[in-house]
Amino acid sequence: MLPFKTLQEAESAIGRSLTTAETIWFNYSANKSDYYLYCHNILFLFLIFSCVPLYYLFLEIFFRKSIQSYKIQPKVNLSLSDVFRCYKVVMRMFILVVGPLQLVSYPSVKMIGIRTSLPLPSLWVILLQLGTYFIVEDYTNYWIHRFLHCKWGYEKIHKVHHEYTAPIGFAAPYAHWLEILILGIPSFLGPAIAPGHMITFWLWIAFRQIEAIETHSGYDLPWSITKYIPFYGGADYHDYHHYVGGQSQSNFASVFTYCDYIYGTDKGYRYQKKVLQQLKGASNSNGEQNGGSATFAKDCKDD
């Protein structure tokens, strides 16, 4: 809750007129507790889990022919009932695990210094903090993910998430309840290292989950703005990890590709891409004479 009763008090305290964004924030948050504002995350996560994957489902239903060439595993097509079953499981975990975790984690958020006060951070500060959060989460998630692929971690916990060898957007948060708790640690470390405003925290939680849905979408869409982010993995990168499955020792990173490259856990993926490029080049140069190789290349992509 803001310690100001009026806009004039707020402007006097910070020594300048409030910006439009700060005025909107004051009018919305002045009489709301910090705990209430923090719990907005529950609503945001529910909306993201429920609505963002619908974008890919909409494309698949109404523009199937147009986007078929962008489908990473075109041989796999789930029915609407399969998709709905996935969503029901995700919502059950949301109600039983994610929601309660948000409700009880507020003291830790206050402890690290997430604030709701004025002034609001500048856009550059928000972008810098979000970049820090993504880098910290990506690095720590990489090592936790590798642990989850050891025999015990996979059999006891992580194999639930790998039930979808051809992932869909709704399956991004589809996981064992213990995995949900464990992977909450990397998401929390960034804000703990560089604590910011509650709005920045909201944006971090939202963007991270939207990114996860994209990488599990099953589509490598050429118009995605994430293709302009350096070292970004994307749907094709993570889809390979799901396809290989429990035996996968490749593409562990959640967002970027540098950890897999540095530690040598992307060799299988890079080899596959190299083979596909060679086969595609051979197909283009030989035309119809190389039809068999072209078919094999397509099958490799399908696989």
Image (cartoon, rainbow, N blue to C red):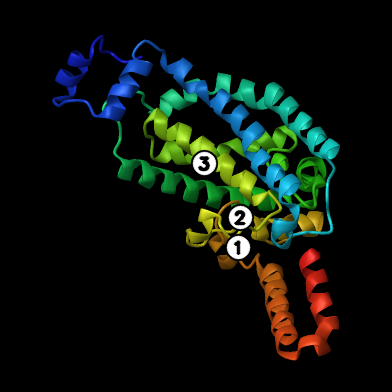
Amino acid type, residue under disc 3 in the picture: Phe
> Residue at the location (73% across, 86% down)?
282
Expressed as whole percent of the image width and height from the top left, the position of residue 122 reads: 29, 39
Q: Earlier in the sequence, mark 3 or mark 2?
A: 3
Residue 135 as seen in the image, left or right of residue 278: left
Whether 12 is drawn above or below 167: the answer is above
Q: What is the distance, in whole Å, between disc 1 and disc 2 at their CAs?
A: 6 Å
Dot 3 lies on which element?
helix
Report the front residue among 128 and 293: 293
Q: Is residue 3 left or right of residue 288?
A: left
Kind of residue at disc 2: Ala
Place residue 75 in its image quadrant. Answer: bottom right
Which residue occupies 83% across, 76% down?
296
* Mark 1 Cα-neighbour bin, 10 Å: few <14, some 14–19, many ≥20: some
Percent position of residue 140, x then y: 56, 48
Residue named by callout 2:
253
Rendered view: 78 above or below 5: below
Mark 1 or mark 3, which is nearer to you? Answer: 3
Res 207 label: 3
Residue 293: x and y, percent? 82, 82
Q: Are marks 1 and 3 in contact (CB under 8 Å)?
A: no
Does residue 252 appear in this view?
A: no
Mark 1 touches mark 2? (CB < 8 Å): yes
Residue 123 position (above or below residue 275): above
Residue where numbered disc 1 is placed: 260
Quadrant into which the C terminus falls: bottom right
Does 226 sit above or below residue 31? Answer: below
Give the amino acid type for the residue marked by disc 1 in the picture. Asp
Precedes in sequence: disc 1 or disc 2:
2
Is disc 2 surrounded by few (<14), some (14 to 19) or many (20+) residues within 10 Å?
A: many
Check whether the beta carbons of the residues at disc 3 and disc 2 lie within 8 A of each other. Answer: no
Name which of mark 1 and mark 3 comes first in the sequence.
3
